[in-house]
Every structure is written in structure tokens, then in C-alpha cells.
Image (cartoon, rainbow, N blue to C red):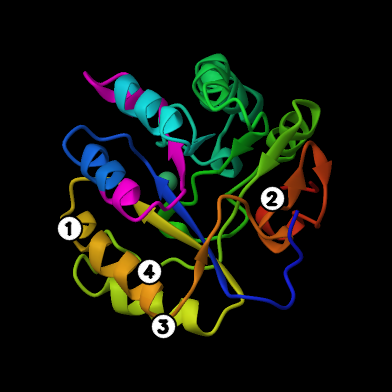
Amino acid sequence: MFGEEAGRRRVTLTFDNGPTPGITDKVLDVLAAHRAPATFFVVGTQLQQPGGLDLARRAAAEGHRIGHHTATHTLQLGAAEDPEGAVAAEIAAIEYDIDMLAGINEAESERLFRPNAAGGVLDKHVFSPQAVRYLQQHRYTCALWNCLPRDWENTETWVDHALADVARTNWSVVVLHDLDTGAMDRLPAFLGGLAAIDVEIVPDFPDSCLPIRHGQLQHSLSHLTNGDG
Ligand SMILES: [Zn+2]
């Protein structure tokens, strides 16, 4: 839809590891106030918490995208002793639920997946060859990132890190976490900072962050995959 070159600077907002009752609600309020679209990469165990599913439904109903961010977020696909079992347990197990949630947003039918990269580290534990094959066969689009302000550690200063990244990048995909760390209290400051430097907040992703698109391998994943990929 968009090229990555030229034009106004863009930002894609993503919120991982939720939904979290008491936090995601506030994030949705802030996004609505700023008319900012986002993608929520949800975790199965979070959806199962009381109120979790309702929050994800609300996000979809308000026009945000819902992506799959594993069933339990406890195991890295490329570190599993039983890679096929990990694909079944961490991806396939909640696929139907995520499809239902994402389907609420009728304008968008693309299946989004984001792997669990422990501490945000993109290394060979992120994928297994079995997981890559599964994502291709099931026509996933795999959405990585290029801006990780580590909001879970830098609960106050992540805003400055993220704004500095955005200022030097044509199209930033920012990873935040709708978790109870206190970091989301600074979301209004971040969105205000983006408005001040005239950045367009968009719902889609730059090609450089999509190694798999609609099941088609776009870039080599060998650096993120154990074994031969
Ligand atoms: Zn995560």
C-alpha cells in the first residue's frame, strides 16, 4: 500500500503481551483520544484472564488490528526440544480464537503473527524451521519491529528513546507492552511527542519488518531460525 521511501515519516504502534485489564483499557482510551491506530499482539493466557477477551474485542471494534503473539509466551519456538509440539501448543492452539478476534475488524483479514523474542533479542531462538514452515503454510504475515524502547525497564524514559528512534527513521515499528509496569502512563506523552514532530501513525507495516507476508517468505530468516531453516 505504501512505499518505504519518501514522504512523511511514519510510525506503526504495536502493543505486545496483553491484553491486561486496567491497562489495555487506558491504552485504548488514549489511542482513541489521539485517533491513533495500533496493533495488539495478544497472548493466549492473557485472553483467558477475566476481562481479557472483552478488551481484545474492544480493541478490534475500535479499529485496531489483533495479532497472534503465542499461546503462553513462555517458550521460544527455536529453543523448544520438541519443535512440532511447540508449534502446536504456541501457535495452532489459539489460532481459531485469534482469527475470531481479528475477524471483527472486517477491513482486514491478514493473519498477523509476532514471535516471542525473549527480551526483544532477535536471534536463532526466535523460530524453528517447523515454525517457519507452519507460518508459510497457514498464510501468516510475520511482523517484527525496528524500535524497541524497552518500556518494561525504562518505564519513564522509554518515551525519549522512542522519539529519538522515530526522528532518525523513515518508518518505525515501535514495540510497547500493555502490561502493568507503569510505562503506559507515559503513552500520552509519547503520542503528543509524535504529533509535535508531525509523524503519521499508520496501521500497516514496512516491508523491512515483514519477513513473511501472506505466507510468502520475503527475506531470509536463517539468522532467526535454529537449524537449517
Ligand atoms: Zn512478547
Left or right of 65 in this view: 219? right
Image coordinates of residue 175 in percent, x first then y, are: 44, 57
Hey, what amino acid is under mark 2?
Thr
The residue where tag 4 is placed is: 149
- Camera-nearest residue between 27 and 19: 27
What range of the chain is rendered magenta?
A: 30-52
Q: Is residue 39 magenta?
A: yes
4 or 1: tag closer to the N-terminus: 4
On residue 164, the disc is 3
The residue where tag 2 is placed is: 225
1 or 2: tag closer to the N-terminus: 1
Image coordinates of residue 124 in percent, x first then y, are: 63, 55
Left or right of 87 in this view: 187? left
On residue 185, the disc is 1
What's the residue at 37%, 56% (across, down)? 176
What's the residue at 73%, 29% (across, down)? 134
Number of numbered discs on residues: 4
